[in-house]
Amino acid sequence: MKEEKEVKTKDVYFKTMIFVWLKLALGGAMFLISLILLAICLGLGSLGSGDGIIIAFFIWLILVAAMYGIVNRYVGYMLKAGHVAMVTTAVTTGTLPENQLQAATAMIKERFVTANVYFVVDRLVSGAVSQLQRGLQKIDDLLGKIPGVSLIVSFAQLFVQIALGYVDECCLGYTFLHREQSAFKSAADGVVIYFQNWKKLLKDAAIMALIVMGVSFLTWLLPFLLFTAIFAAFGIHWVFALIIGVIISAVIKSAFIDSWMMVKMMVSYMEVAPTTQITFDLYDKLCKLSGKFKSLFEKGQQEQQPYGAQM
């Protein structure tokens, strides 16, 4: 069974590879713009006083952070939603449309109508998961005085953080399956289903979490060493190589590693979601643990009809 699931994950990943390449192209474009901005800022900073370089560097950081925030919100999120839609289709039907971009766009518009609705649902799901994740911290607070336990809990938190990093994609995928109800209601149901099956899903993510940490380190180390050598030849401080290495690592991780983990977690999730009998008292428990989940749940209760039916 395990072998079949891994083959399925690989098949879905490569069949939806167009979204991986688009994520890489988007990240690569932002990286090139970041380099151009860095060259401009350093050039202008070198014309000033001794502190000019430092001031120019911080201006560059602000510009790059703003650029990444804006692009991710208006382009990156839509790419993720489209990828989720196609992965959901592939996992649940076993087939994919010829024009995946067109089909994904149609599914997003039908499900969320406007990008703003998608943003609200995505942010509420992510916020709820982050709040629920902090529950592990209580274990650390209670047992932290026992030698070695704090380290074990911290390591466990790292695994949970990696696994839960893909909960929102799983829940968004669940909204595409249940178009008969509002996106908020489907997302709330999706969160409950995820936490009902957390042991199985976390187990599936454990090995991949180690791989993610190892590959992420390598994707940072190699660019860092390369740019350190290049910058050293021009007398540029190694800190710039460190930051560029981080940016390159983030681009590669977002395009390839995150996409693989997302597909793997969604495959595991979609296998258990249809057969999961929702424990309704879990809604109340999660509402008490997370204000974000409570908001998501209440919006779902208020919206009795799917967004597409209201237009």
Image (cartoon, rainbow, N blue to C red):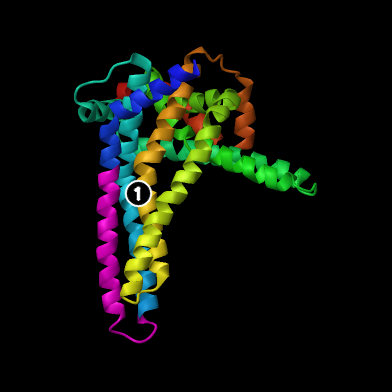
Q: Quadrant of the C terminus?
A: top left
Q: Left or right of 89: which side holds 121? A: right
Say if 190 sits above or below 50 in the image.
above
Expressed as whole percent of the image width and height from the top left, the position of residue 205 reads 52, 32
Expressed as whole percent of the image width and height from the top left, the position of residue 234 reads 30, 75
Front one among 278 and 133? 133
Q: Left or right of 209: which side holds 11? A: left
Q: How many labels does the image show?
A: 1
Q: Which residue is drawn at 40% across and 34% down?
A: 260
Q: Left or right of 74: which side holds 141? A: right
Residue ID for mark 1: 251
Q: Residue at x 36, y 72 (%)?
A: 232
Q: Residue at x 31, y 79 (%)?
A: 45
The prevailing secondary structure element of the residues shown in magenta is helix
Q: Quadrant of residue 227?
A: bottom left
Q: What residue type is labelled 1?
A: Val
Q: Left or right of 260: which side holds 159? A: right
Q: Residue at x 30, y 67 (%)?
A: 38
Expressed as whole percent of the image width and height from the top left, the position of residue 92 reads 37, 16
Front one among 240 and 189? 240
Say if 95 sits above or below 65 in the image.
above
Q: How crowded is mark 1: few (under 14 residues within 10 Å), some or many (20 or more)?
A: many
* Residue range (magenta): 24-52
Is-magenta flag for residue 37?
yes
- For the question of whether residue 252 can be seen, the reply is yes
Q: Quadrant of residue 246?
A: bottom left
Is-magenta flag for residue 57?
no
